[in-house]
Image (cartoon, grey):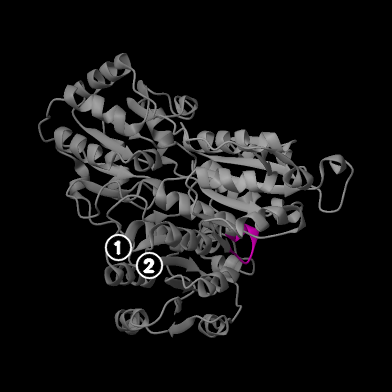
Amino acid sequence: MLTSGAKILVSCLEEQGVRNIFGYPGASILSVYDALAVSSIRHVLTAHEQGACFAAEGYARRSGHAGVVLATSGPGATNLVTGLADAYMDSVPLVAITGNVPLAQLGHDSFQEVDIFDVSMPVTKYGIIVKSASEIAPAVRRAFALAESGRRGPVLIDIPSDVLDCSAEYEPAVPERPSPLLPDEEEIKRAAELIARSSRPLIYAGGGAAAAGAEDRILELSLRLKAPVVTSYMGIGCCPPDHPRFLGVLSDINLKAASAMAECDLFITVGARFNSRYGAFGGLKKRRTPLLQFDSDRAEIDKNVPASASVIADAALALDALLPLVREKDEAEWAYDLLPDSAQENRGTRIIRALTRELGDGVTVTTDVGLHQEWAAHNAQVRTPRRFLTSGGLGAMGFGMGAAIGAHFASGDVCLVITGDGSFNMNLNELTTAVKHHVPLVVAVMNNNALGMIRKLQTARGTKGSAMSSLYLGVDYAALARAMGARGVTVTEEEDVDEAVKNALDGTLPVVIDFRIPINTGI
């Protein structure tokens, strides 16, 4: 049956099980919007394409399935690039669909023409330029398969506007779901032998463990090995915060986790990259600590730290194969037991603990990037994977609002956005999206009138003066929230935090809580 390209596109999205799309219309993509209007798919109109891309990311991170974002040509497409880069670095499955100028106008500097295929190539897993209506269905099916297989990531489909208006034959098909990568038997044996020779192993769980649903296997491995567990930002939730062997997030401010890393005689990493954010990884190479690495992406093996043994497979399947070969170990003595609790204590951390305590285990937490991200990672009480969503590899300010909106559409959760005044200023326009779609958000603005992380780094460098990190904006965020149709609350006094949190949550959502904190908090 002959069908227009736009209808084929939407039918294929329905075929893939898509129920929500985040986007912003424009001339080059209008045919798709016409088709969406009579489809089963809900389109969430955001305030900006970057917010739409972060929302699609939040949807994917919370649900585990590919999020979908839609944008027009030119600036609509280029506004997606930060979100695509964020998804690429954090291995988030995403399908981005952009319209472009008509096929014959490509390469002629037409109005709103951008070669988004080449622009996005370094920050996407794959890109497709569709040049005929008959190519749309195979492109969409391939995009979802690639986005959700192996090491997950974003895929771009760019479609000239006239291709969307042309017709082609369309036959529905059953989606092909990628099979998880199976472990190699010999690799598993070598991993078990390396574990058997260790006496003080340490387990490091990352985003790959969370994506594979391997948290129960990690806890079982920890139990058998009497091994402490640390996580990356992306692995938060793989071990409950009150678990006796959980040492928290591995970072330069967590002394217990750093001490365990220095003492261990085997570092077992499950689905985590060794990026440059924490200098501690350099110590692994310097001390030549044996490394056992589980990852679904062969390119990550030996990339930054040489591995003594590796298993290239889905994390859950790899641990399922490993556990029968692992014998229970005796309890080891660790010096980290003698260290005091190294969690940073300040008004920001107390606010975050109060918020997550009141909202309970059913909340999904998103963050922006800055000091508040550190505070949230170490203090938000998140017990299960996919409920702590943050920009890990890219460190994108403005991520939290869009991600929370997407996470809500994936789960129905109340979402807590932990942000700073600097980050909130980046994408506060998405508060209008939350209001319009009745998204239950609690937005906690850590308002210190500064770019806190920059101020901290400048202080460490001995920089005199603070003109480049002090905002001094004087914005009344509670009043701004009310102007946008949300509730707004201002909290100024330390002793008012617990009561203010309870009162703020006892009302309609979304709500913005403007927490005024001293400029040098946490520095």
- Residue 204 belongs to the span the image colors magenta: no
Give the label on residue 138, or none.
Answer: none
**Which mark is on residue 362?**
1
418 or 496, which is in the foreground? 418
Q: Mark 1–mark 2 contact, CB under 8 Å?
A: yes
Residue 26 percent coordinates (x, y): 73, 59
The furthest residue to the top: 186
Apparent side of residue 382 relative to residue 397 in the rendered image (left or right)? left
The residue positioned 32% from the left and 39% from the top of the image is 204
Work out which residue is located at the far left of the displayed protein and give it: 330
In the rendered image, the vertical position of residue 234 relative to residue 320, given as above or below = below
Q: Which residues are magenta?
A: 45-51
* 192 w.r.t. 315: above or below: above
Residue 429 position, x and y percent, is 60, 70
In this picture, residue 209 sits left or right of residue 278: left
- Residue drawn at x 62%, y 45% as measured from the top left: 9
